Image (spheres, coloured by chain):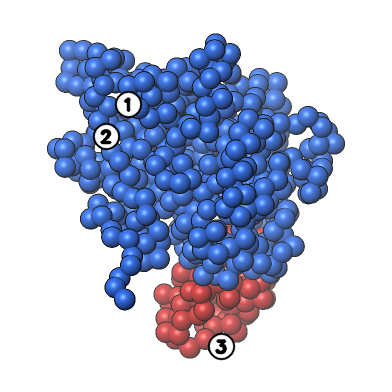
Chain colours: A blue, B red
């Protein structure tokens, strides 16, 4: 019998790029610290780490600039990578832009987004650690879909808690996950103490990523075969996503280009980190100047209005505490179609990049993002997911501000997923039914106060240690 | 062995000088001296210092409860021997 493996394209990276080698100062600020959680429970029946050691090591590794991708994962990446990088020439023409606009398209795999890059890697590592069942929370459903598929491929059970507002907006997301064998629950649910408490306080609660994560974490506490898998934020997750940026560097180099500006949407930071970190490493190495722009939802402006403090990533309070730009884990963003941007905090690595000025934040409201997404679709024939449409809107803003008398600006935007399951939302936009949603000021004020009180209690507990 | 481990934890992981000197029977997990980041750091230190490779099965609370417990665990390991799921 011959070799029946999928041929690998030479541009498929064989290693993940590890920014912690170049910037080890990010490790201490960008790693979860269970001690500060106080009452944090030990996950997985006595194991000290929730994650397999192989994954945890990746989050603190400062020794290796490149980390080899296991062969089994490369075989799976080869099914859909490298992903396309194209110049948006029609969009440039339509804008009359003094710019060369490139985009990287991550929506052309079965699950429809970049999330598959880490879902496959995590399923592999958990499987190697003899875990049988992965449980997660998902907001827009892209992560849940990717993990469900990865679990099916690697033969793990999968349970997904999906935020109620987005599951009701896009029930077909739930259908996709079930097709891949996952058990899908609407969050908040009555299956967990966290969910029951939220429903008791507000039976009509729309749900948040923090609550969904809390429900998932509660489910794994008493199940030795199960672990909580996270779709964004963790250093290891961003590491897995660096295949995006590495490919883009290689693809742009073939065109003789290096961007002045790299733009991606910001949920907790995985698609941003995936495209930005390899370019950051390349810019640091070559001395080139580079802007890295993270575009967040105006309904959940964690970078532009959040505090850089210790916070939880779930509503149960069992997750480790990390120092992040956060609106507080009790903040309930108003429902927006970009569910992937509704997480209350940026991840620790993206937060550290913002704290030292490496990352440039921008917030975009929902109406502006849909306008940008449809414009992109009309010009380029790709309908961006609502999250990616925020990145497009940010890109349009940057291009429009670039002085005409200067050399054209070269921009690269990450289209992290397709919007084909968001046609209902785009239809409402076309019908004039989409509003520019901004932060819920009442919830934000209460949540920030709670966040500050939480940090005060941490300070006191550390001082008392 | 105990002194090497105690020196590393005292130097790198103890968050508050008031906790020093560190006794070899001080509860590292319960006292909060060893958090998840600290655990990863000491795993890397022990691997490099004692020539072992640790895996998921080694990360049990009883192996990291105290300096004495870490030392006892290390004495069960042969240098260079890889653990399962490493």
- Dot 2 falls on which chain? A
In the rendered image, residues at marks 2 and 1 fall on the same chain = yes
Residue A56 falls left or right of residue A46: left
How far apart in space, not on screen, are marks 2 and 3 (Cα)? 56 Å
Q: Position of residue A269 (x, y in %)?
A: 47, 40
Residue A74 falls left or right of residue A126: left
Residue A456 appears in the figure: no
Label of residue A380 in the image: 1
Q: Secondary structure at mark 3?
A: loop
Going 25% across and 55% down the picture, which residue do you hit?
Answer: A9
- In the depicted structure, whether residue B35 falls above or below residue A199: below
Q: Position of residue A125 (x, y in %)?
A: 50, 64
Q: Earlier in the sequence, mark 2 or mark 1?
A: 2
Name the one closer to the observer, A318 or A88: A88
Residue that numbered label 3 is attached to? B76
Residue lying furthest front in this view?
A1
Name the one closer to the observer, B76 or A185: A185
Asked whether the residues under the numbered discs 2 and 1 touch, taking CB atoms below 8 Å apart as contact, a structural biologist would say yes
Residue that numbered label 2 is attached to? A86
Label of residue A458 in the image: none
Going 64% across and 26% down the picture, which residue do you hit?
Answer: A335
- In the depicted structure, whether residue A239 falls above or below residue A303: below
- Dot 3 falls on which chain? B
Residue lying furthest left in this view?
A256
Q: Position of residue A107 (x, y in %)?
A: 41, 39
Quarter containing the N terminus of chain A? bottom left
């Amino acid at each position: 019998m011959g070799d029946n493996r999928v041929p690998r394209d030479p541009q498929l990276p064989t290693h993940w790029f590890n920014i912690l080698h170049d910037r080890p100062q990010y490790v201490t600020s960008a790693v979860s610290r269970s001690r500060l959680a106080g009452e944090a429970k030990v996950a997985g029946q006595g194991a000290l780490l929730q994650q397999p050691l192989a994954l945890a090591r990746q989050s603190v590794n400062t020794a290796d600039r490149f980390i080899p991708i296991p062969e089994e994962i490369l075989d799976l990446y080869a099914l859909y990578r490298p992903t396309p990088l194209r110049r948006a020439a029609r969009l440039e023409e339509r804008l009359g832009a003094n710019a060369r606009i490139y985009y990287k398209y991550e929506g052309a795999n079965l699950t429809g987004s970049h999330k598959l890059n880490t879902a496959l890697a995590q399923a592999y590592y958990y499987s190697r650690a003899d875990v049988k069942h992965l449980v997660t929370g998902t907001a827009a459903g892209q992560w849940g879909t990717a993990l469900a598929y990865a679990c099916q491929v690697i033969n793990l059970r999968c349970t997904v808690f999906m935020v109620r507002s987005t599951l009701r907006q896009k029930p077909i997301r739930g259908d996709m996950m079930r097709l891949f064998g996952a058990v899908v629950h609407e969050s908040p649910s009555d299956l967990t103490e966290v969910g029951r408490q939220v429903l008791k306080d507000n039976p009509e609660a729309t749900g948040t990523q923090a609550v969904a994560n809390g429900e998932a974490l509660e489910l794994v506490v008493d199940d030795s075969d199960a672990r909580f898998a996270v779709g964004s934020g963790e250093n290891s997750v961003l590491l897995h996503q660096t295949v995006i940026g590495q490919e883009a560097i290689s693809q742009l180099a073939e065109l003789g280009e290096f961007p002045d500006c790299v733009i991606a949407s910001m949920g907790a930071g995985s698609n941003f980190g995936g495209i930005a970190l390899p370019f950051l490493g390349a810019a640091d190495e070559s001395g080139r100047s580079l802007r890295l722009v993270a575009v967040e939802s105006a309904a959940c402006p964690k970078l532009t209005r959040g505090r850089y403090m210790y916070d939880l990533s779930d509503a149960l309070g069992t997750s480790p505490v990390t120092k992040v730009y956060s609106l507080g884990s009790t903040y309930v963003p108003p429902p927006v179609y970009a569910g992937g941007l509704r997480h209350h905090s940026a991840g620790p690595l993206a937060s550290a990049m913002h704290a030292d000025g490496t990352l440039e934040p921008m917030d975009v409201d929902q109406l502006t993002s849909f306008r940008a997404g449809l414009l992109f679709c009309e010009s380029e024939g790709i309908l961006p997911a609502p999250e990616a449409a925020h990145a497009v809107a940010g890109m349009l803003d940057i291009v429009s501000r670039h002085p005409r008398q200067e050399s054209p600006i070269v921009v690269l935007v990450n289209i992290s997923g397709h919007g084909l399951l968001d046609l209902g939302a785009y239809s409402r936009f076309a019908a004039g039914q989409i509003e520019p949603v901004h932060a819920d000021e009442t919830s934000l004020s209460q949540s920030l106060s709670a966040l500050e009180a939480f940090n005060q209690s941490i300070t006191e507990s550390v001082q008392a240690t | 062995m105990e002194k090497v481990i105690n020196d590393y934890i005292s130097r790198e992981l103890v968050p508050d000088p008031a906790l020093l000197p560190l006794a070899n029977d001080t509860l590292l997990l319960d006292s909060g001296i060893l958090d998840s980041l600290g655990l990863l750091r000491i795993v890397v230190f022990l691997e490099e210092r004692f020539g072992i490779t640790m895996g998921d099965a080694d990360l049990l609370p009883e192996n990291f409860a105290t300096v004495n417990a870490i030392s006892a665990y290390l004495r069960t390991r042969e240098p260079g021997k890889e653990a399962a799921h490493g």
